[in-house]
Image (cartoon, coloured by chain):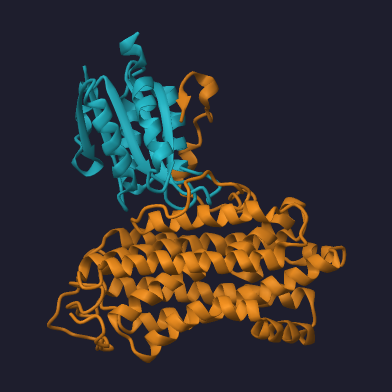
């Protein structure tokens, strides 16, 4: 069993959350952590757990660099792939973490979506407290 | 680099130097901008987001608000005009200040973004004038602007920012640029929010929605400006170790802290007679807001960590602003049904 966390980060907020999730997850399962720039799309099907991390710009759009990953999962993923999506954003926008919602709706239909997780800007203590829960939900099928 | 040595206003063109600047201040830079070859590529995305926000006041028809104006209470009308002229006064400062900074920044992509920010502040300024012209005669407008200039609370809160801006104009050193930038976060990221709260509160009651639509456009712009300035400060500190001192980090905490106290005072003053806004809750909101600004600057929270206590203070949705702009991809991605935790996954 193997997990992968693919993320994009401009200011480092999403990277902070990705690292926290990685540190928690790696104690349970072999995990790769990589930025979208280094991710090879053809390897998606090597993983049993696939976690996406994305920030949200402006009015809730996907960041440009995440669009190809979105389309790849849309066309190549299968219902057995256990997925999760997390992200950072700003609650002053009407669509808080809109990019997480975009991924969520597609992942729900195309994959086995386990959990979503939204953080405002850089993570605070209450967010760090949610990381173990996020990982537990992700691995729920495996554990039971 | 000496932090107290004035920066030189840079030459328009330096052909021997690279297009990709070696620093945001004191950098080697030709002065020619090629967005495909810049030191901080994320700035291109920010620039495009700013342009995507383009709007103008005249596109919003004020007729509905004109009809409602007479039905507002005397208190509401009074606060409306005071907030409007006070925000207009702040924006009036921001346009020339951003232009001033532009003269000393060596990275051409930052100059371009400052030009767009300056332009947007001019639009904001105009929108307040446009709202005023729809609602009250010029004599009343002038009276209100004079009151705003003389109001001791307004003067006190503006002084914090004015001092920092003026000292950079008088003596444009790196230290003064840093202090200007921190106060710019106060202006764009904190001082607007009592005003925003007032207008969005009217909107919650279906009052003066056209004005609130403009306020919403303004907030959307200001959020990008505060984000840009926080990135500007982070890059300025990381590129210039002499500025990255404990004293300057302390300066950020102290200065934003002071702005929060002044904003609380202003809020107590203008919102005290407005039903439905609890002042204690608004104080908590301001502290939540300040924590966000600190985290945007890569610093720790200064105030207790708390959830947004006034979630209704936010930019209107596109639907509400009748916006139709969206690219092909955005339309396509809407084909999925919106799902939630009731569909069998967890939302944290």
Q: Nearer the viewer, residue B271 or B257?
A: B257
Q: Nearer the viewer, residue B151 or B135?
A: B151
Residue found at the far top of this picture? A144
Residue found at the far right of this picture? B71
Coordinates of residue B239 in the picture (x, y in percent): 21, 68
Coordinates of residue B106 in the picture (x, y in percent): 25, 78
**Picture residue at 74% right of the left edge, 69% below the top:** B79
Residue found at the far bottom of this picture? B170
Q: Is residue B238 left or right of residue B79?
A: left
- Establish if B184 lies above or below A21: below
Which quarter of the rendering shows the N terminus of chain A? Answer: top left
Can residue B22 be seen here? The reply is yes
**Picture residue at 74% right of the left edge, 57% below the top:** B202
Displayed quadrant of residue A85: top left
- Establish if A41 lies above or below B60: above
**Picture residue at 27% right of the left edge, 88% below the top:** B6
Residue found at the far left of this picture? B16
- Establish if B284 lies above or below B239: above
Q: Is residue B197 left or right of residue A58?
A: right
Which quarter of the rendering shows the C terminus of chain A? Answer: top left
Coordinates of residue B71 in the picture (x, y in percent): 87, 63
Can residue B47 be seen here? The reply is no
Coordinates of residue B136 in the picture (x, y in percent): 79, 78
How many numbered discs, if any?
A: 0
Q: Chain B appears in which tint?
A: orange
- Establish if A144 lies above or below B266: above
**Picture residue at 52% right of the left edge, 55% below the top:** B287
Displayed quadrant of residue A38: top left
Q: Nearer the viewer, residue A117 or B290?
A: B290
Q: Which chain is cyan in the picture?
A: A
């Amino acid at each position: 069993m193997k997990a992968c966390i693919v993320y994009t980060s401009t200011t480092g907020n999403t990277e902070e959350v990705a690292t926290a999730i990685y540190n928690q997850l790696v104690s349970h399962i072999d995990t790769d952590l990589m930025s979208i720039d280094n991710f090879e799309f053809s390897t998606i099907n090597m993983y049993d757990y696939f976690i996406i991390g994305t920030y949200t710009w402006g009015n809730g759009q996907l960041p440009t660099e995440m669009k190809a990953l979105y389309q790849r999962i849309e066309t190549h993923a299968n219902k057995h792939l256990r997925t999760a999506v997390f992200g950072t954003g700003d609650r002053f926008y009407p669509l808080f973490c809109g990019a997480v919602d975009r991924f969520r709706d597609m992942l729900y239909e195309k994959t086995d979506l386990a959990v979503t997780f939204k953080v405002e800007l850089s993570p605070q203590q209450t967010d760090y407290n949610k990381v173990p829960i996020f990982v537990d939900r992700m691995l729920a099928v495996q554990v039971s | 680099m000496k932090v107290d040595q004035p920066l030189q206003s840079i030459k328009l063109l330096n052909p021997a130097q690279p297009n990709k600047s070696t620093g945001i201040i004191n950098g080697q830079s030709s002065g020619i901008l090629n967005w495909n070859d810049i030191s901080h590529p994320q700035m291109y995305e920010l620039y495009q987001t700013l342009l995507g926000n383009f709007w103008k006041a005249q596109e919003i028809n004020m007729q509905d608000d004109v009809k409602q104006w007479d039905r507002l209470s005397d208190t509401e009308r009074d606060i409306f005009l005071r907030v409007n002229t006070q925000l207009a006064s702040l924006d009036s400062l921001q346009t020339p200040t951003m232009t001033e900074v532009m003269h000393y920044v060596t990275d051409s992509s930052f100059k371009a973004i400052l030009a767009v920010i300056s332009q947007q502040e001019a639009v904001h300024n105009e929108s307040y004038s446009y709202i005023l012209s729809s609602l009250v005669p010029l004599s009343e407008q002038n009276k209100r602007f004079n009151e705003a200039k003389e109001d001791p609370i307004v003067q006190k809160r503006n002084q914090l920012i004015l001092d920092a801006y003026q000292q950079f104009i008088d003596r444009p050193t790196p230290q003064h640029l840093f202090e200007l930038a921190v106060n710019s976060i106060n202006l764009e990221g904190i001082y607007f929010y009592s005003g925003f709260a007032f207008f969005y509160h009217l909107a919650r009651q279906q009052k003066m929605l056209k004005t609130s639509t403009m306020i919403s456009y303004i907030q959307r712009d200001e959020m990008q400006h505060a984000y840009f300035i926080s990135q500007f400060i982070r890059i300025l500190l990381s590129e210039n170790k002499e500025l990255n001192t404990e004293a300057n980090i302390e300066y950020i905490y102290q200065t934003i802290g002071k702005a929060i106290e002044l904003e609380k005072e202003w809020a107590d003053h203008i919102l005290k007679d407005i039903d439905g806004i609890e002042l204690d809750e608004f104080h908590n909101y301001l502290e939540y807001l300040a924590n966000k600004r600190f985290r945007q600057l890569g610093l720790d929270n200064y105030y207790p960590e708390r959830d947004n206590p006034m979630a209704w203070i936010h930019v209107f949705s596109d639907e509400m602003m009748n916006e139709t702009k969206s690219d092909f991809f955005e339309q396509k991605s809407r084909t999925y049904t919106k799902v939630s935790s009731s569909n069998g996954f967890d939302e944290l």
